[in-house]
């Protein structure tokens, strides 16, 4: 059960980023109407593609996770159905909630004259963790209940597979549908691999996290915030590319400087808040925790990483577009995964610098 949860979060985050990025750009281009009912064919094709990608990636991830855990003797052959059934059922349940939520957030922000490229994914990222966790817990409770619930899970799994096959057949010959599946499947699977590498780096920080217990609380806020910074920059650039506002990479960098600094101005203040809130949460159980240290870690990590993720967002958006790919299928899933690794790698040097300055 524990082995399945992190990759499920990664896959749903990647597919959520793909859906929200495409939806924001399509609203700007007029390919999607700012309404739920009677929307365009492209909107429903995007939903169908997101569903099929979810099924393909979760089945592949479940098989990989089973093989790995079987080789490490952390699973038995009798648990194969668990690895095969739980990821698709949990992620499709989450998808059934997150797609309407994403659509409503995007449409409401667009109707109010706000920019969905800036607002949709950061809001969605926080909500999605709750939605995915609830769906995963519901699925696992069915597994633990056993009996008829196991048959129900297998039945749901077969229905999910059948619907995916039907949607793929129904949309045969639709270029946008198959481009989204081809590019989205590849980048989400790659994101899962990078997420596993991030887990390796994170496991190596165990001693450091024990030495500074506040970091355990602060770390998720840092990764989420950096992912949001990158997704805002990347999503706005994909829209600029689609609208033809950018002619070459130099123009893209020049036009992005002001937006990056604007996003960072807000992010800098928020990281101070992250440090303070972490101190309030941790200090009752750990009286020796330092407010200055936590705020310094948050702010220094932000300063040392935002340019990295900003430049990465620009590079991946521009060059995926130049190669004839759809940047919205690639940018946000790649950014959110890389941001986790960037923060993980940056935290240890930040602590060493703060120790040298006498703040740790």
Image: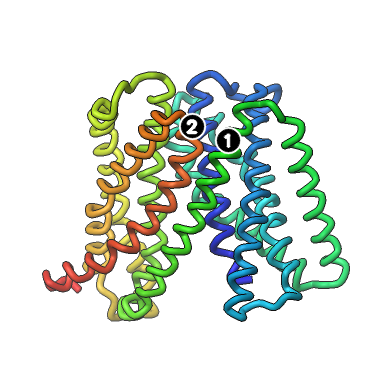
- Side of 315 where 197 appears, left or right: right
Q: Which residue is mark 2?
A: 326
- Side of 170 where 72 appears, left or right: left
Q: Which residue is mark 1?
A: 180
Above-or-below relation of 270 to 43: below
- In the rendered view of the protein, which quadrant contains the N terminus? bottom right
Residue drawn where x is 37% and y is 74% of the image: 204
Pick the residue in front: 210 or 333: 333
> Secondary structure under badge 2?
loop
Label drawn at residue 243: none
- Side of 236 where 59 appears, left or right: right
Pick the residue in front: 223 or 292: 223
Residue drawn where x is 42% and y is 69% of the image: 200
Above-or-below relation of 246 to 181: above
> Secondary structure under badge 1?
helix
Q: Position of residue 90 (x, y in %)?
A: 68, 57
Q: Position of residue 124 (x, y in %)?
A: 52, 45
Residue that protrudes farthest toward the right in the picture: 148
User: Which quadrant of the figure has residue 33?
Assistant: top right
- First of labels 2, 1 by sequence position: 1
Residue drawn where x is 72% and y is 67% of the image: 82
């Amino acid at each position: 059960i524990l082995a399945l949860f992190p990759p499920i979060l990664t896959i749903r985050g990647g597919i959520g980023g793909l859906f929200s990025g495409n939806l924001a750009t399509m609203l700007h281009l007029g390919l999607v109407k700012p309404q739920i009912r009677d929307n365009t064919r492209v909107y429903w094709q995007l939903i169908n593609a997101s569903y099929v990608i979810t099924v393909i990636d979760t089945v592949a991830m479940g098989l990989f996770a089973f093989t790995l855990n079987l080789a490490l003797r952390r699973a038995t052959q009798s648990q194969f159905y668990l690895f095969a059934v739980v990821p698709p059922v949990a992620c499709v349940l989450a998808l059934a909630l997150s797609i309407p939520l994403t659509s409503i957030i995007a449409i409401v922000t667009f109707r109010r004259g706000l920019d969905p490229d800036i607002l949709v994914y950061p809001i969605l990222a926080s909500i999605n963790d709750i939605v995915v966790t609830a769906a995963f817990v519901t699925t696992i409770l069915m597994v633990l209940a056993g009996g008829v619930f196991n048959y129900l899970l297998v039945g749901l799994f077969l229905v999910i597979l059948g619907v995916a096959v039907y949607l793929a057949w129904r949309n045969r010959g639709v270029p946008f549908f198959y481009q989204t599946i081809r590019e989205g499947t590849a980048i989400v699977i790659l994101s899962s691999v990078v997420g596993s590498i991030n887990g390796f780096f994170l496991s190596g920080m165990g001693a450091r996290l024990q030495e500074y217990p506040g970091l355990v609380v602060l770390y998720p806020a840092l990764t989420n915030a950096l992912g949001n910074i990158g997704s805002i920059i990347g999503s706005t650039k994909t829209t600029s590319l689609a609208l033809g506002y950018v002619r070459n990479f130099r123009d893209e960098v020049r036009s992005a400087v002001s937006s990056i600094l604007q996003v960072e101005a807000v992010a800098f203040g928020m990281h101070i808040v992250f440090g303070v809130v972490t101190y309030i949460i941790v200090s009752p159980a750990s009286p020796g925790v330092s407010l200055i240290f936590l705020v310094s870690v948050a702010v220094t990590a932000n300063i040392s990483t935002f340019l990295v993720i900003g430049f990465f967002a620009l590079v991946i958006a521009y060059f995926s577009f130049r190669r004839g790919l759809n940047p919205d299928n690639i940018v946000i899933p790649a950014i959110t995964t890389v941001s986790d690794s960037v923060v993980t790698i940056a935290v240890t040097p930040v602590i060493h610098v703060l120790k040298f300055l006498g703040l740790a």
